[in-house]
Image (cartoon, grey):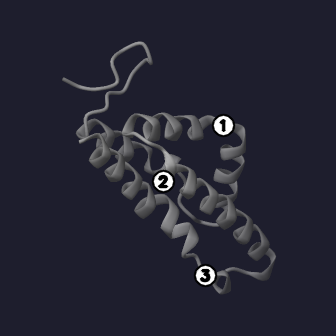
Amino acid sequence: MPDKAREKLVDFLERKAFRPVLDADADSYPQSKRDRLKDVQEATRAEQERFRKYGSAQEVYRMFKDDLSSEPARKIHRELRDLGLPTLNDCKGEFERLAEEVGLRHGPQSRSSLSD
């Protein structure tokens, strides 16, 4: 069951955050923004691979939360926003609802991360 939960979380991120960035067409952007698009696509591809390698739903959830506040991720989020592309922050609420649906709880680390 945990593998199913992990898959649901990663698939969600794939649909809502990664694919829209990776599928963005450079020809739709002015020349002045194309290099930035390429940079954020490379960063997104690396992030996508990291999330695919996480072994549990808990790890996916924890790293998602970490990526919301890490300085390198915040820099990429600013670039994505400037390009009109979705960020992890944009899908935070939906992701947290899905995490709860698959059995993860929100709240401090000291509490149990799995629901009853």
Relative horizontal placement of residue 80, taking residue 4 as reference (left or right) = right
- The image quarter containing residue 97 is top left
- Pinpoint residue 90: horizontal percent, then vertical percent: 48, 51
The percent coordinates of residue 39 (x first, y second) are 74, 65
* Residue at screen point 63% across, 83% down: 28
Q: Is residue 30 above or below residue 107?
A: below
Dot 2 or dot 1: first in sequence order is 2
Mark 1 vs 3, N-terminal side: 3
Of the numbered discs in the image, which one, if any, rests on residue 70? Answer: 1
User: Which image quarter holds the N terminus?
Assistant: top left
In the rendered image, which residue does mark 3 sit on?
Answer: 25
Give neighbour class at mark 1: few <14, some 14-19, many 20+ (Cα, 10 Å): few
- Residue sitting at x 71%, y 38%: 71
User: SS at mark 3?
Assistant: loop
The three-letter amino acid code for the residue at tag 2 is Arg
Which corner quadrant of the image does residue 12 belong to? Answer: bottom left
Dot 3 and dot 2 residues touching (CB under 8 Å):
no
Look at discs 2 and 1 and give the one toward the viewer: 2
| Label 2 Cα crowd, 10 Å radius (few <14 / some 14-19 / many 20+) | some
Mark 3 neighbour density, 10 Å: few (under 14) some (14–19) many (20 or more): few
SS class, disc 1: loop
- Please identify the residue farthest to the top as the structure is shown: 110
Residue 24 lies, with reference to residue 13, above or below; the image says below
Circle 2 is placed at which residue position?
A: 52
